[in-house]
Image: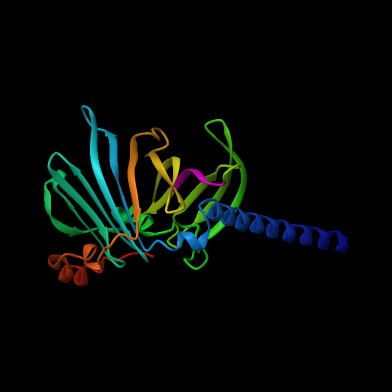
Amino acid sequence: MRHTAMVLVVTSCLGVFACAQTAEELVNKNIQAKCGLEKITTAKTRLTTGRIKGAGRRRAMVAAFREMNMRPDLVRLNISMQGMTAVQAYDGSAGWQTNPFRGRKDPELMGEDTLRDLLLASDFDGPLVDYAAKGNQIEYLGHDMVDGDDALRLKVTLKNGDIVYYYLDPDTYLEIRKEIQQFVRGSVRERVVDLGSYKPVDGVMYPFSISEGPKSNPGAQVTTVNKIEVNVAFQESDFALPASLRTEEKKSGLVGVH
């Protein structure tokens, strides 16, 4: 009886170890599919430009976007339409925004609710690269289906508790879908992100077609990337809090949740 119990314990431990090894292997294969860690980390900045198409109240709305990323975790997103530009930025400790489309032309600090997506975007290489050092945990969940095709499913629990499910193409090991769960003030916010049209930029593979939305309408917003450039000359001041917010930030304590 004791021997049987020990066999079960050992088998269970080996099963957990195998899953952990499989998850690690899949992450490594994903990184290699994008051209390897060494090549990925040669990019110190990245500029992505294109257009975003989403459903408006009366008709489809199309906007131009410009996203700037700078290591280790700086990001700025400009969205322009009808002669106006909205800005969202994270300077490594605090997020801020201007939104003239809602009548808010002056910069304001971002709260935790609106900051979550920006924190994901600020991770220059994404949650899989150096996941352990970032405090993320990974788990292999086996095979699943994406639009009728086989996919490998990874669960990534971020340091802040949010969860990203990655669906990898079993042939290329590139991600074809992400399901994001964010836990904000006791509620769960979910969305689906589909990725495709991968192209090499300085040898590294990036998706040039991205659609996202809630599970009930995953294609609610379609992003078409026109161009990606790496090692563009940016300054930290491009992401920094505007002077009008620096005193306010100290008073409010609204900072990043890495």
User: Residue 169 appears in which quarter of the rendering?
Assistant: top right
Q: Left or right: 153 with respect to 117?
A: right
- Can residue 185 be seen at all in this image of the molecule? no
Where's residue 27, x and y in %?
A: 57, 55
Its colouring scheme is rainbow
Image quarter (top left, top right, bottom left or bottom right) of the C terminus:
bottom left
Relative to 229, 175 lies left or right? right
Residue displayed at 22% across by 66% down: 240
Image coordinates for residue 175, horizontal then vertical, percent: 50, 45
Quadrant assignment, res 184: bottom left
Q: Is residue 145 above or below residue 167?
A: above
Q: Which residues are magenta?
A: 173-180
Question: What predominant SS class does the magenta segment belong to?
Answer: strand
The residue located at (52%, 46%) in the rendering is: 174
Residue 193 spot, x, y in % from top left: 42, 42
Residue 223, picture quadrant: top left
Of residues 124 and 88, the one nearer the viewer is 124
